[in-house]
Amino acid sequence: MILVSVMYPAGGRFDMAYYLGHHMPLVRERWSSFGLHEAKIVRGVSTPDGGEAPYQVMALLTWESADAFQKAAAAHGAEIFGDIPKFTDRQAQVQINEFPESGA
């Protein structure tokens, strides 16, 4: 299992209603059959010292494998990533994470 973090930097425009009502259902619809197990959304609130959170929204996507994510991105990435400008003017940062053997 891997976790793909899609992180949207703070600032700029972000239409949460569109993101939750259209974009994330599209992600689930297109990618579930490719091995997307779970998609959690978190909204950045602050840093521990009360400063502005560096990311306003993060999507945490749990996948069967990195290969499954790559196949899904190849099949539907243009549509999904092409939808991003409809809800934000920020450039998403994507990171692939592994679960440590003892922590999975």
Image (tube, rainbow, N blue to C red):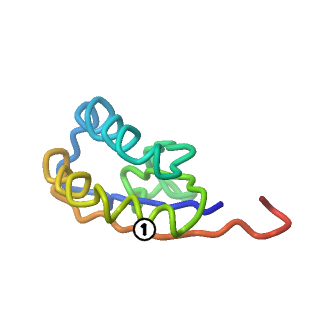
Residue nearest the observer in this picture, 22 or 11: 22
Residue at 48% from the left image edge and 60% from the top image edge: 5
To which quarter of the image does residue 15 belong? top left
Foreground pick, 78 / 47: 78
Q: Residue at x 21, y 60 (%)?
A: 78
Give the residue displayed 19% in from the left and 45% down from the top.
Answer: 87
**In this rendering, position of residue 2 left or right of residue 102:** left
Say which of 32 and 23 sits in front.
32
| Picture quadrant of residue 12 | bottom left
Quadrant location, the N terminus:
bottom right
Identify residue for label 1. 70
Quarter containing the C terminus: bottom right
- Image coordinates of residue 14 in percent, x first then y, are 22, 46
Rendered position, 43 above or below 74:
above
Q: Amino acid at mark 1?
A: Gln
The image position of residue 88, as x and y in percent, is 19, 51
Q: Residue at x 70, y 65 (%)?
A: 99
Residue 83 vs residue 98: left or right? left
Q: How crowded is the residue under tag 1: few (<14 C-alpha within 10 Å), some, or many (20+)? A: few
User: Is residue 87 shown left or right of residue 92?
Assistant: left
Where residue 60 appears, as percent x and y from the top left, is: 51, 52
